Amino acid sequence: MLERRTIVFSDPRLAQLEHPAFEARGERDGPHVALIAGIHGCEYSSIAAVIRFMNKLDTAELAGSITAVPVVSMQSFERRSPFVVPEDGKNLNRCFPGTYDGTYTDALARSIFDDLIAPADVLIDLHGGDLVEALEPFAIYEASPVEERAQAIAVAFGLPYVVREESHGGLAGLTSSAAAQAGIPAVIAEAGGCGLLDPVAVELLVEGTQNALRSLEMLPGPVAPPRPDMRLVGAFDWLHCRSAGFWESAVAAGDEVTRGQLLGRVTTLHGKLKERIQAPRDGVVLFLTTSAAVSDDGLLLGLGAELEPIS
């Protein structure tokens, strides 16, 4: 059975927002999966992937159940706000598991965690490059007691890179880290870029979700093996500029670079060089800020390092 409904979170600050959702129940017992997107409201390929996957799903073949929400940050989606929630300027995917005692975004994170993530056996969180972000497809899972199961799901997505994020490492407050700390295997899968609705990226995420559910024995059919060029990313460096300026990248998302290689320059609007950005070590550009306008301590790119084949 597939039901289309809306979710309204109980916190009074969120009471006016309806979130379209799908509830799928299979004819056989199996895990309960939370499938979400729209943590960042302008990552349209990931939103489209949830909608397409759920509308293609044959629940007669499904074991277990799926709660799917294409957009969990409705304010960000409606106001076309990249990265942050307009109400308080916070990045929702740095606020999990959240708290009702905090600001609007903290309460939204807690609501998503309590109503969608905590009741699930597995979390799949789909993302893609935001309005000013080019991206090479990759999946993230958290180092945790359930990481073996999470890694298997991440590998099943079939994306070129799989990032193992250290617990309490460079990123904090992710959906995947909050889920892992609660003992729930979780994966963030990223494909798309520049706020575009990219059919190739949508299909990557749809096919990845389908293969992930096969790996969980929720859908029939053989599990596609890891692609031959898939690599594990052991470290994830996020590079920032020191001060505001005009950012001119010398690389593209997906480029492999070597230590010391020029990645780009930040100049003044008179063209005077302010800063050369060089690779701190060998790696691959997993995402890249495409906006030339950057602020103080502005994020420029993400470098995946310590690459090795998936064993």
Image: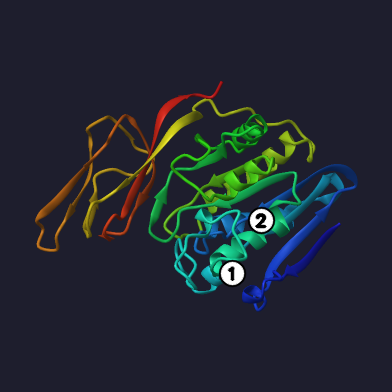
- Amino acid carrying mark 2 in the image: Phe
In the rendered image, which quarter contains the N terminus? bottom right
Mark 2 and mark 1 lie on one chain; the one further toward the N terminus is: 1
In the image: residue 51, left or right of residue 292? right
Instruction: Pick out the residue farthest to the top.
Output: 311
In the image: residue 183, left or right of residue 133? right
Which of the 4 quarters of the picture holds residue 110?
A: bottom right
Query: Which residue sits at x=45%, y=61%?
Result: 83
Query: Which residue sits at x=45%, y=58%?
Result: 130
- Amino acid carrying mark 1 in the image: Met
Q: Is residue 30 above or below residue 83?
A: above
**How many dots with numbers?**
2
Between 87 and 49, the one nearer to me in the picture: 87
Q: Position of residue 105 (x, y in %)?
A: 54, 65
Q: Which mark is residue 178?
A: none
Query: Which residue sits at x=60%, y=36%?
Result: 154
| SS for dot 2 | helix
| SS for dot 1 | helix
Q: Which mark is residue 113?
A: 2
Residue that mark 1 sits on: 74
Q: Is residue 70 above or below residue 122?
A: below
Q: Position of residue 55 (x, y in %)?
A: 73, 58
Which of the 4 quarters of the picture holds residue 14?
A: bottom right
Q: Residues within 10 Å of mark 1 (few under 14, many from 20)?
A: many
